[in-house]
């Protein structure tokens, strides 16, 4: 099962709304506020790599007030 961690930069003061929206996406298994360069981290699990790409591209990156993302796909079999 493909898994990715998505680091998210949010518009200032909009973190709570984004976090609430992320937690409503069925494939987002975890979402947390973080301190540092990024504001939020989300763990995404999917059945296929194609589905994982769709979730990140069409559900997470298009959320209102998401400024940018960095996706780190988990390496399987290492």
Image (cartoon, helix red, strand yellow):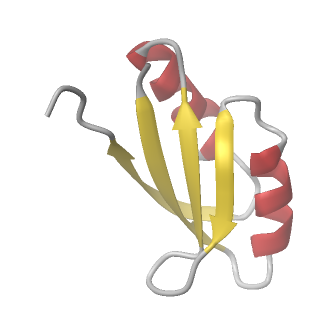
Q: Position of residue 61 (x, y in %)?
A: 59, 46
Q: Nearer the viewer, residue 19 or 43?
A: 43
Q: Nearer the viewer, residue 74 or 70?
A: 74
Residue 58 placement, left or right of 63: left
Residue drawn at x 54%, y 22% is 46
Residue 28 placement, left or right of 3: right
Against 12, residue 25 (above or below) is: above
Against 19, residue 53 (above or below) is: above
Q: Position of residue 28 (x, y in %)?
A: 66, 39
Residue drawn at x 47%, y 86% is 36
Q: Position of residue 25 (x, y in %)?
A: 77, 36
Classify residue 3 by image quadrant.
top left
Quadrant where the image shows the N terminus: top left
Q: Position of residue 18 (x, y in %)?
A: 77, 60
Residue drawn at x 83%, y 50% is 21
Residue 56 placement, left or right of 73: right
């Amino acid at each position: 099962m493909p898994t990715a961690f998505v680091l998210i930069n949010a518009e200032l003061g909009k973190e709570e709304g984004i976090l609430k929206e992320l937690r409503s996406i069925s494939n987002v298994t975890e979402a947390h506020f973080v301190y540092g360069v990024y504001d939020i981290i989300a763990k995404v699990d999917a059945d296929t790599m194609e589905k994982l790409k769709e979730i990140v591209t069409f559900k997470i990156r298009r959320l209102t007030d998401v400024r940018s993302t960095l996706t780190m796909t988990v390496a399987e079999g290492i």
